[in-house]
Each structure stands twice: as C-alpha cells, then as structure tokens.
Amino acid sequence: MTDTTCLLVRETYFDTASGLLGARGWSLCHGLEVGGEETLTLRRALEVDLQGVVTEQEWRVPLGGHGVYAHLEGDDVLARTLREHCEPWALRPQVALDVDEVSRGIRRRWWGGPSHRLRIRRCIAHSGKHTDAFVEYTVESVGPREPVLDDLAEELSTRLGTVPDARHVVEVVAGFAKRPSRSAEAAALAAPPAVAVLCVHEGRVGLVGEGTALLPFVVPGEGEPVAEEAVRRRSGEVPEGGLEFVGFADPGSNDAALELWLCHVSGAEALPHVDVWMPIMELLGRVGGTGLDDPTLVAALDLLLGSQAGIRLVSASARHAITCTDLPGSVTGGASVERLDSVLSVLDFHQRVLEMALDTEVPLLERARFLSIFSSNLDEFFVVQVGGLKTDVASSAGYGEKDARRRLLLQSISIRVRALVARQYACFEHEFVPGLASHGVRIVRWPDLSATERAPLERSFFDRIFPILTPRSLEISPGHPFPAIAPLEVALGVTLRAPGTEDAAYSLVTLPAELPRFLPVEGGASMIAVEEVVAGMACHLFPNCTVAETHAFRITRAGNVALDEEGVHSLLDAVEDSVVSRPFRPVIRMEVEEGMPGDLRLRLLQGMGSDPGTEGVWLDDADVYRIRGPLDLRGLVELTGLPVPGGVYPSFDPGPVFDGVRPVFSVLDERDVLVHHPFDDFRTSVGHFLREAAEDPDVLSVKLTLYRTGRDSPVIEALLAAAAAGKSVTVFVELKARFDEATNIEWTHRLRDAGVHVVYGLVGLKIHAKTALVVRREGSGVRRYVHIGTGNFNASAARFYTDIAILSSDPELGADVHDFFNQLTGTVGAPAMDYRRLWVSPSSLAPNLVERIGRLSRHAGEGGTARIRAKMNGLTDPELIAALYAASASGVEIDLIVRGLCTLRPGVRGMSERIRVRSILGRFLEHARIFHFQEGDEEEFLVGSADWRSRNLRRRVEVVAPVDAPDARLRLRRILDAELADPRAWVLRSDGVYERMAEGGVTAQSRFMEWVSGGAT
C-alpha cells in the first residue's frame, strides 16, 4: 500500500422531506473539511451487483464561499442536473457525518501505479436525535473496473469481518435511527430538532431576548422552509438577502439536532423585532458572559466560526473598533448570577492587553511588545486554564451537569480566542508591518529575497542552525513511533516526495527555543522569521527527497502537574521530576499555518491524539487554530530594538532612594521608607538594603523569602556575599512557583552549596510572601529591620512591574517577621500564630479582612461615613465578595482597582450598586496591593503580597502589614487618588464587560513618572 492521504470532514446529506433523491438513486453531499474548504457532490448509483459493487456517476464542485442553495441556483452541470429531479428549495439536511478518513493506494503488482484505493472511514452519524458510530471500508477502482475488485471485497470480509453493503450511507443511518437506542422515557424527554437563524447586517448580528438569554431565531423543525418561517415570525417576510445554510451544530448537552442558517439583511429596519444588534467581533468576544451563555447560541457561533461564511465575517470585521453594546435590561437586570466566571475574566484581561497593542497612541514598537505579551499570556492561559478544564473533564464521567458546564465553557473559550487572535493578526498584518515599512524596515519571506540577500542567510543557516536541527519522520512504524514534540516551539511540517514517485511522506523539524525568532537580512533593514530560512533550506535536511511543501505549526501542552506532596521523600526531587515531565503532558492546542493542507494537518492531529501524554484528554479539530501569519508572536519582542524613530516610550530613569552615603540602617532608625517601583529604583532601595546587610559587619543574620527572582539576580549575589562573610543566612525558596521551578531549583542548589540554610516547601501551600528580615547588632542588643512588599525580589521585573514595599525598623513589625520566619523554618505547617501587627494567610488574613469590611458595614448602617479603596491583581474569594456586597448594601462606598480577573459584579441594584471596579494597564504592569479602610475620620492603610483570591487567602502563605508613617500614608493616598482618576482606565460594568474610558488627561503612570522627575503633581 502506498500514497496515503488523510481527511477530516463534516458531510451533510440533503434530500426532500419525502426522500425523493434517495428514491431515485441520487445523493447530494455538502463537505466541510478541517481547513474550511467546502465542496458540493452529487452522486448517482448506476449499477449495483450481487457482491455489493457499485458503479457511480459523480459531479463535485468547490463552493468557493457560496452557500449550498445559492450554488444550486447556478448554471453548472451539478446544479442543472439536480434541478432536473427536484427544486433546491425543497431540500433540507437529513444526515450529518463526522468522518475521519484514511485513504491508501493499492497495487496489484510491484510495478506500476495503484490500481485501486482503499478508504477507511470512521464515522459518527447524526440524524435528528440519533447518534451512531460505524466504520465504512470502500474499495474503488482507479482505472477500468477489474475482477480483482470482488476479490478485494472478499479479502476484507475474511480479515475484518466486514459485510458487503451497497446501500447509500443515508439509508444506513436511517436504519440505525429505527433501532431502539434509548428508553421510551428518555426518548420522550429528547428535544425535537430545531432551526437557528443568525441575522447579519454589515458585520452585526441580530439577537432576540428569551428570558435572561439572547439567542438567534430558534424554532422547532428542520429545513429552509422552517428557517424562513422563523424569520417571518419576527419580520413578516424573508429579507431580500435570503438565507444561507451553514451546517449542523451540537448544542451541548441538548439532544436536539440544530441547523444553523444565516439571514443576510439589507438593513436593521428589515427586522424590527430584533432586540439587539451586536458587532460580530464583540459578540464572539463576549460569548459565555452575561446573557450570551445559552448553549444554543454558543453552539451556533462555534459552528459559524468553522464555516466559510464565518471566516468571511471575521476577516471583514477583525479590524473594527472594539465596542461595548448595551444589552436589554431584561437580560442584564434579570441575571441572577452573583459572580462572574473566573476563567472568562482571565481572558478579559488578556483582551485588555491586546487593546493596548491596538491603541494607535502607543508607540509602534511598544505595540509590538504588547502583541508579544498577549501571545505569552494566551500561551499561559491554555497551559493553565484550558489544560486544567480538559484534564478535569477527562478525569470525570463526562456526563454530569458540572461536565456540561465545563464543556460549554471550553466551547466559549474557543470562540473568544479565535476572535482575539483574528484581531491580533489583523493588527500585525495591517498596522505593525506597514508601520515598520514606513520607516524602511520590512518583514520579508524567503521567496521575496534575491540570491544576493539569501547568501548570508544560507551561511548563517549552515553555521548556526543546521547543526542543531533534527528531522523526524511522521510515518509511524515499529522503528518510528510518532515523535515527541516540545511544547510552544515552532516546528515545520514537511511534505516529501521520493524520486520517481508521486507518493507523499511526511516529516517534521522542530526549531529549538535557543534560535532567535527573527534574523536580519544583510544589505538593508529587513527581518525574516527563522522558520522562513529553515523552510527555504529544508532540502539540505532531506537530501534524498524532494521537499514539496513546508508549513509551520506549534503545540501547547497542559502545564499543571499534580504533586503528591505528602507522599514524597523530597519536595525538591518531586518538583525537579515534575519539571522534567512537563514536556510530556497532554497536548491541548495545535496552531497551524493557514495554508497547511488537510492531509498534513490531519496527520499531525491524529499523531497528537496518540501521544502518550494525552491519555484521556481529547484533541480534535476544535483545538486546531489556523493562523494567518507567522506563528508565535512572542518573538516580536526581538524587534523592539529596531531603529524606528519614536517607536518606543521616552526613556525614564527611576529616582534614587538611598544615596549610598548615609547607611541604610541609620535612615531606617529614623523613619520608615515606602518605595514604589519602578518609579523608585530597585537597586538603590531594596537592592541597596540587602547589599549593605551583606557588607555590614554588625549584621548577624539575613532571612528572606524567594518566589520569582530571575536568573541574573543581585539579590542572590547579596545573599551569597552575606554567607561568605560568615553571617547566618536563611532563605525560603518556593519551588512550586509556576514556570519558575527550574530557576528556583537552580538557585536552591547554588545557595545550599554556599552554606545558606535553604527551606523549600510547605506541604499543600505556596509561600508567596515578599518578606525579608535583617538582624543587626546595635549597642548591647540587636535591632530588626524588615522589608514587606508586593513584588518579588527581582531587579529585572522591578523595571517593568509597579510594586510597593515598606522598609521599617518598627519593633513590633520586626518581632512579627522574626516569628514568621521561625515558624517557616522551625515547623512543617503553615504560620498560625496571632501576630502583633501582621495579617498572615491562611490563618488571619481573610478573617481580618472580613472583620474590617463588616465593621465598616455596621458603621455605615448606623449612619456614619465609610469607604473602602483597594488595589490588587485579582478578586475571586466568595466570602470576601459576599462581605463587600453586604457593605455596599449598608452604604459603604467601595472603589476597587483590580488589574486582572475579577468575579465580583459591580453596579447591580440592591446588591453592589455602591461598588465600582476599574482596571489599569499601561507602560508598566500593575502589580501592587494597597488596602485602604476609612471609618469616619479614622484611616487604615495596608500593603502586602496578597490578592483577594481564594488561592491567596486560603492556599498560600501571604503577609500584609499596616503602614503607619504619615509621609508613607500620604503617598499611598495619592497613588490611589491618581489611579481612580486615570482617564484611560477600563471600567467593569455590571454585565461583566470592561469598557475603556476615553477621557483626556494624564494617566496615573505618567503622573507617577512626573513626580519622580520633579514635575507637577
């Protein structure tokens, strides 16, 4: 057997209600392949012999973006032939098949080409409420029919137990449908087939309200007449644009077969009874949220995105401005959900990052940086959130209500991500690339280069790239299992042809992560993606074959690794093992170049499905993302150094904190010091504090928690210097800091080898606190100096993250932090004592927050004034949200600045109408946590490492400390004032949508830079 091809296709068979085509031996099939290619096939059985051999006549045409019915009104042979037997309007979908097909050529002799083809089709059939699976084997003569065809059929029967069956597949499925497949009670409860119609006008979709949900037009029944009737019920007539059939959708746990149709209308006035017209990109970006989470709507949009009609709509709308349509009050006001979905809220944050890239006021190269950050964020979202959801579904029965919700959520995520990625690549293609070109910098492809331009790249390929590439075959055999593919690395799928044959073979080449993402083209300012160079030189990797095609792809694997922390001998060894195992976790996403052919795409998809790490976690076409442009835009960060005038933000020099003349400890003896990174320099503040502790002969000990510190760390160097100077140095390294495990393991070994006392784990908890303690000999006693902050001890991150830290010699804070470290090193459990000033999770932080909020609620309820202002990265804890709702109802005014995910619904009458939530993004990543409680004239400020998320309050060790110094309090108050007045912040609406403000004025981050530079306040 040779010449193997693969195909993944959805086939929809049409007939009249009376089965007229089938009765006359005809069949009409609409095929939708993985890549979106659509065909229409008309077949007629001319002869059927006793052995089940069928002689057929066939017409097949590409649809080319036209709907089935529009094409059947045309003038080609297929359309004319069909109209001789029935009217196109009388046809309706009868059966849908999800087909996974492998086709192989068969040779009768060792010479010559194939005489027959064997098609193995694994089918899942849908007809009404019936679903069945079967395998169909078909042997076809390539040339004139030969007697051997009967022999091959007999061989199949002998070896595989197949039964010759000349019936058409529609008849076969009809036979399945007649079998009793469920109890009479279950059948009675099954939903009837339904038709859904999405009305479209100038890139907007019309929806109608049904209770608290927005839906397309949905009516029971099947076929175009029913779809027309659905439209007439709302408008009185079918608009001039007509109807376009899209396909069958599976509405989640509903047993009903759902037909999806598009109704193209010339104007919104043609459908006066539509409740809301929403831009298609906004609808796709909000699906799953308030009012837009009905399974029927989600299923319809999911199917639409996989069709040519959906591709056209998204392509035409991807560059449209982001909008925030108001939904009907009956939808938003009637929604009873008290909290927003946390996973979709994370995705909302990633959209806000993307909006920074779309903002034309942001310098061009900084927009590229935001495109890169968005790609990195999306990778992590799949690794953590999607990987977790898929693993949860795979590990359960799969049929409960919780699993149905998870599957609906995964479907909503897929829709949202495709819309976001479409916007991202539209920005890259239509704004970033032309923007670079306007400055003389081109991003080019290999075919665009002259021989002179290619020559230096060819030398670079042989010198730097070729030696580290390893081609691996995708032809599975006993000696060649499907290759293990590293996650998040760009790879090339290669189609090969051996000399003297047209048979295709497949291979892949992974591009190691150490390669640069882009290479400069000599003789100009052009840049080229490294995979373009490898593809252009691929013939040197396969010297005995012809390279027919190369196409880039990339996979993502689930990243969470469950640790049996109580059952391991060494947590360090267990975390090291988990890091090693991460590249073999289940594959959950595959990104492919838009032009990748279906055979190669399916070969990869099937191979990933058989990957040993994918046990139980499904991978199918819904997990394939076709990318219109270079994969992995994380690499755009490499282009931010290009010579583009005005391409980056103006340079900014952070202000010094300690001058290096007066000892740090002398300053802290007099006053607390509040630092605000990156506006205050890390190296002259926290870095100087630790460096001086290492060098001061009176310092006796240094204790510190490390969560993420980076690879080039002055903090580590200071700790090593302190140990070398004979001081007692204790470091708590959190090995389980996600994706920083390898770095932290490396530092653990280095610190331990230098004589540092290293503790690296509490069972079941992560140490997320940002604390340091320096014990110094002073006179006849000792004095403690502490650092309590919101950010990691990471000098590099401190240049880009906004964080707060308090440096203090307060005796009570010092005693508390000392006790905190003693508990970390002296016991195996979480810190659980009553501290003098500190709030520490998981013991006292959440109770103290709830108590403070409750106290303000009582004060407001008694007629007093009360206010809460808090800044954090995330808010999800149900107990805390309930306390905030109660405070709002009692009269407390609450302003929250939440950078990332937030499941609290603000502004809901009777529940949260006094709560306002903002999100700020800008040049720097907001990371600080500040809590401000005001009861009458009494105020309390706290800073620390904890967000108001359940994981921070209940599954992590966090430290929050009060700020007492008047000048420090004043600075915190001014920070909150500036951020709550930021004219470009995003405001969270009660329906869960973030709407960006468009007011003029200076942003908070710009104001902070002005303060440091001595500008206006």
Image (cartoon, grey):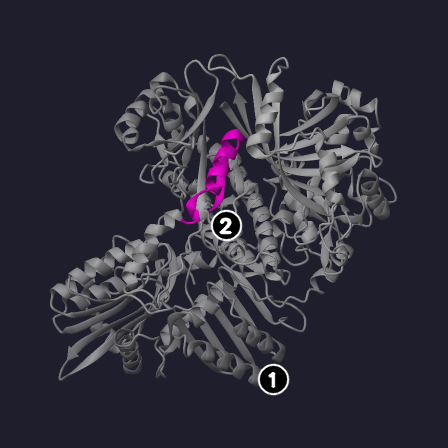
Residue at numbered disc 2: 617
Mark 2 or mark 1: which comes first in sequence?
2
- Residue drawn 39% across and 19% down? 545
Percent coordinates x, y for residue 405 in the rendering: 61, 58
Percent coordinates x, y for residue 122 in the rendering: 59, 37
Is label 1 in a helix, a strand or a loop? helix
Q: Is residue 612 magenta?
A: yes
Crowd tier of the residue under label 1, counting other residues whose Cα lies within 10 Å: few below 14, some 14–19, many 20 or above: some
Residue 985 disc label: none
Quadrant in the rendering for residue 675? bottom left
Above or below 369: residue 4: above
Q: Nearer the viewer, mark 2 or mark 1?
A: 2
Above or below 852: residue 909: above
Observer able to see residue 682 = no
| Quadrant holding the C terminus | bottom left
User: What range of the chain is rendered magenta?
Assistant: 585-613
Q: Nearer the viewer, residue 703 or 500?
A: 500
In the visual, does 779 lie left or right of 816? left
Type of amino acid under label 2: Val
Crowd tier of the residue under label 2, counting other residues whose Cα lies within 10 Å: few below 14, some 14–19, many 20 or above: many
- Residue drawn 37% across and 27% down? 533
Q: Is residue 958 magenta?
A: no
Q: Nearer the viewer, residue 617 or 855?
A: 617
Residue at numbered disc 1: 861
- Residue drawn 36% across and 33% down? 479
Mark 2 and 1 residues: CB-CB less than 8 Å, in contact? Answer: no
Cα gap from disc 2 to disc 1, whole angstroms: 52 Å
